[in-house]
Amino acid sequence: QVQLVESGGGLVQAGGSLRLSCAASGTMTSRNVMGWYRQTPGKQRELVAAIGRIGTTSYADSGKGRFTVSRDNAKNTVYLQMNSLKPEDTATYYCNLKYGMAYERDYWGQGTQVTVSS
């Protein structure tokens, strides 16, 4: 079982920055992908950014050039640095970890709220 604990959400003005953190604990393989998704009421959860253990990254178009995902493998922690935030970035952000031969083992954090005021 894997537990994911997020931190770093909050209220920020448009143009500001926030850094989200997510620490993973429990049993998992070293071959895993950690990432961030976000969700607003009435909409599906969407990928924001993901990063593999060796640092390969993937970003949604909405965050390219503004968001940076990174990880510290020694701490089993993933980060999301969000700069130039926009009101449309307002959402609940969820940490995700996947592992397994087909990454079928899928775990989620409890979510952290990010609110960007205009």
Image: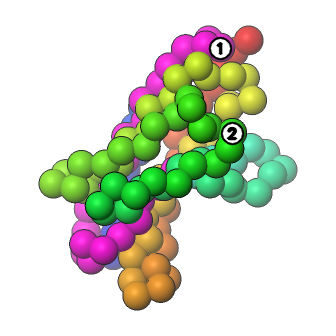
For disc 2, the neighbor class at 10 Å (few under 14, some 14 to 19, many from 20) is: few
Q: Name the residue under label 1.
A: 14
Q: Are marks 2 and 1 in contact (CB under 8 Å)?
A: no
* Residue type indicated by callout 2: Ser
Q: Which residues lie in the magenta part? A: 9-36
Question: Disc 2 vs disc 1: which is toward the camera?
Answer: 2
For disc 1, the neighbor class at 10 Å (few under 14, some 14 to 19, many from 20) is: some
Q: What element carries label 1?
A: loop
What's the distance in space between the residues labelled 2 and 1, CA to CA?
Answer: 15 Å
Q: In this view, does 27 lie above or below 115?
A: below
Residue sitting farthest toward the bottom: 101
Label at residue 5:
none
Residue shown at 68% from the left, 32% from the top: 89
Q: In this view, does 36 lie above or below 68?
A: below
**Rendering coords of residue 56 (x, y %):** 40, 58
**Res. 3 visible in picture:** no
**Rendering coords of residue 35 (x, y %):** 47, 55
Q: Which of 14 and 50 is in front in this view?
A: 50
**Rendering coords of residue 82 (x, y %):** 51, 29
Mark sitting earlier along the chain (2/1): 1
Q: In which quarter of the image is the C terminus?
A: top right
Label at residue 62:
2
Residue shown at 52% from the left, 54% from the top: 58
Specify the principal SS of the magenta part. strand
Q: Which of 34 and 116 is in front in this view?
A: 34
